[in-house]
């Protein structure tokens, strides 16, 4: 069953917590991965791979650069999940 | 004073070793004669001919915040932990620049490793085979590169004068400290974070070293397996961890009122050009390194009271080192109290020069030499003063000096000299 936007944001918060150590409650749709959540370009690849597994979605490398905020990622996953 | 003959001093020390998670507990373990060697548990070690090693007493992933730890190879984790301790021990309270006592462009790091992020490389190859390309960590390259520990320590302290990594197998850590001394002497830096680190306790390196017949197979008695100078020694025991010192020009240290442990007189270097892995049997290369040390540093052999020997517990190496020293030092070898701390820590490969420099500095500072453990029957081929049983008090008064030897596969010989201030 496809995840809701709320479930996706919760999932991303857990992933960002695991990778960057940011508390889950600080991960919200308007937050920038790079500027607010201490996720650099290498760690972003980890976030993407973890999100792909968790939400059964493929996020090609060329789309990753468009995912600036948690909201961008949640919308992308919502639209492309299997 | 011109920049080329500036005096270099040690102002901070840090370590994480098989004996303890910091330099104080490591030193305590060395004086107590504790062995850090343990059996290697787990199925992945079960088929190996060698099933013992000296793992770090404190797991580095429990010390560092998880987000940092997962981006660092274990060797870099050790280096960062030891460097943080040394940096604070030297009296610095923040990275260079933020702490105005040192500017970033006058600060360097030289942290070495013998084999770099070998466990990262092997673990990620397992990931590639078992889980596929996509799951290979994007941090793999920065984690496996041998300059990773030096670079990560550089990031920690904001070092901009230069970040370097000499690689010379088991001489790497000592070579790093020698390189750091030269950075200060030649005026490239005022302060350098220097040392060695290693994390290679994994079935592949153990299988490889064991197949070279370099390691002890005394699986039944792990704590007695590392026994330099003993008649029954049968090879080294692999250890892991890091040792780091803060080196500083004497003027820089004095200007900020830093506590000084000792002076670093300098280094002596040579190469065997004999065999890729076997020591040159007459000790020609080692003798040349020690002679260079005497020539380069003005070290007075009469003041030399302590040696932290390379002595890894191999049948050939331990005696060859002492014969070479006798050749160069003559009767002066008789007043040198010799410690083989690898009898307790195991052999940290590229980390050895780091932790043994920390041990040598503390021996001079406290004027006491740790004993070599497990010498039940001294090899009759040894004609030198090996400290056994209890630690040995060094002369309480007057200037005293010590040297620390490290040799590596490839025929690299490095010897460092230190002197009380």
Image: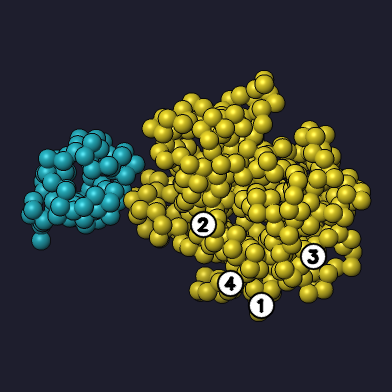
Who comes first in sequence, dot 2 or dot 4?
2
Q: Secondary structure at mark 2?
A: loop
Closer mark to the observer between disc 3 and disc 2: 2
The Cα atoms of the two marked residues, 2 and 4, are separated by 19 Å
The Cα atoms of the two marked residues, 2 and 1, are separated by 26 Å
Chain A shade? cyan
Whether discs 1 and 3 lie on one chain: the answer is yes
The residue that disc 1 covers is: B221
Mark 2 Cα shell of 10 Å, populated few (<14), some (14-19), many (≥20): many
Mark 4 Cα shell of 10 Å, populated few (<14), some (14-19), many (≥20): some
Would you place residue B61 above or below residue B115 in this image?
Answer: below
The residue that disc 3 covers is: B229
Q: Quadrant of residue B4?
A: top right
Judged left or right of residue B213, residue B117 is left
Return the chain for callout 4.
Answer: B
The residue that disc 2 covers is: B22
| Residue, far top | B2
Q: Secondary structure at mark 4?
A: strand
The Cα atoms of the two marked residues, 3 and 2, are separated by 27 Å
Residue in view at x 44 percent, y 33 percent: B96
Mark 1 Cα shell of 10 Å, populated few (<14), some (14-19), many (≥20): few
> Residues at badges 2 and 1 in contact (C-beta under 8 Å)?
no
Pick the residue in front: B361 or B353: B361
The residue that disc 4 covers is: B38
Q: x and y percent of residue B179 in the render? A: 64, 35
Would you place residue B97 above or below residue B41 in this image?
Answer: above
Who comes first in sequence, dot 1 or dot 3?
1
Chain B shade? yellow
Closer mark to the observer between disc 3 and disc 4: 3
Return the chain for callout 2.
Answer: B
């Amino acid at each position: 069953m496809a995840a809701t936007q709320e479930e996706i944001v919760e999932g991303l918060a857990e992933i960002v917590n695991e990778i960057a150590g940011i508390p889950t409650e600080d991960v919200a749709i308007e937050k920038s991965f790079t500027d607010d959540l201490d996720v650099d370009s290498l760690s972003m690849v980890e976030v993407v791979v973890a999100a792909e597994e968790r939400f059964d979605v493929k996020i090609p490398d060329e789309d990753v650069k468009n995912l600036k905020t948690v909201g961008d990622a949640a919308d992308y996953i919502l639209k492309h999940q299997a | 004073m011109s920049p080329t003959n500036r005096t270099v001093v040690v102002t901070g020390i840090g370590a994480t070793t098989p004996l303890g998670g910091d330099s104080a507990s490591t030193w305590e373990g060395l004086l107590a004669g504790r062995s850090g060697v343990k059996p290697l548990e787990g199925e992945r070690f079960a088929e190996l001919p060698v099933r013992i090693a000296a793992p770090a007493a404190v797991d580095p992933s429990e010390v560092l915040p998880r987000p940092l730890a997962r981006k660092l190879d274990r060797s870099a984790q050790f280096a960062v932990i030891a460097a943080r301790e040394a940096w604070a021990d030297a009296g610095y309270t923040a990275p260079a620049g933020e702490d105005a006592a040192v500017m970033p462009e006058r600060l360097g790091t030289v942290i070495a490793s013998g084999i770099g992020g070998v466990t990262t490389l092997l673990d990620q190859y397992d990931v590639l085979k078992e889980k596929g390309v996509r799951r290979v960590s994007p941090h793999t390259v920065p984690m496996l590169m041998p300059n990773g520990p030096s670079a990560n320590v550089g990031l920690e302290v904001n070092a901009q004068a230069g970040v370097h990594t000499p690689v010379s197998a088991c001489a790497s850590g000592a070579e790093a400290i020698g390189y750091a001394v030269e950075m200060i002497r030649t005026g490239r830096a005022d302060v350098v974070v220097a040392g060695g680190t290693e994390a290679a306790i994994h079935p592949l390196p153990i299988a490889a070293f064991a197949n070279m017949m370099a390691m002890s197979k005394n699986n039944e008695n792990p704590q007695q397996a590392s026994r330099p100078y003993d008649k029954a020694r049968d090879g080294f025991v692999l250890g892991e961890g890091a040792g780091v010192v803060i080196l500083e020009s004497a003027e820089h240290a004095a200007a900020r009122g830093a506590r000084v442990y000792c002076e670093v007189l300098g280094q002596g270097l040579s190469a065997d050009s004999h065999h890729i892995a076997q020591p040159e049997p007459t000790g020609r290369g080692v003798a040349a390194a020690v002679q260079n040390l005497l020539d380069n540093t003005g070290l007075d052999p009469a003041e030399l009271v302590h040696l932290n020997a390379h002595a890894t517990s191999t049948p050939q190496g331990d005696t060859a080192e002492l014969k070479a020293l006798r050749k160069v030092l003559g009767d002066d070898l008789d007043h040198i109290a010799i410690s083989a701390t690898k009898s307790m820590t195991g052999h940290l490969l590229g980390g050895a020069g780091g932790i043994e420099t920390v041990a040598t500095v503390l021996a001079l500072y406290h004027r006491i030499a740790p004993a070599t453990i497990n010498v039940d029957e001294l090899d009759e081929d040894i004609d030198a003063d090996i400290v056994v049983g209890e630690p040995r008090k060094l002369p309480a008064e007057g200037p005293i000096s010590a040297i620390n030897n490290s040799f590596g596969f490839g025929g690299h010989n490095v010897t460092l000299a230190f002197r009380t201030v």
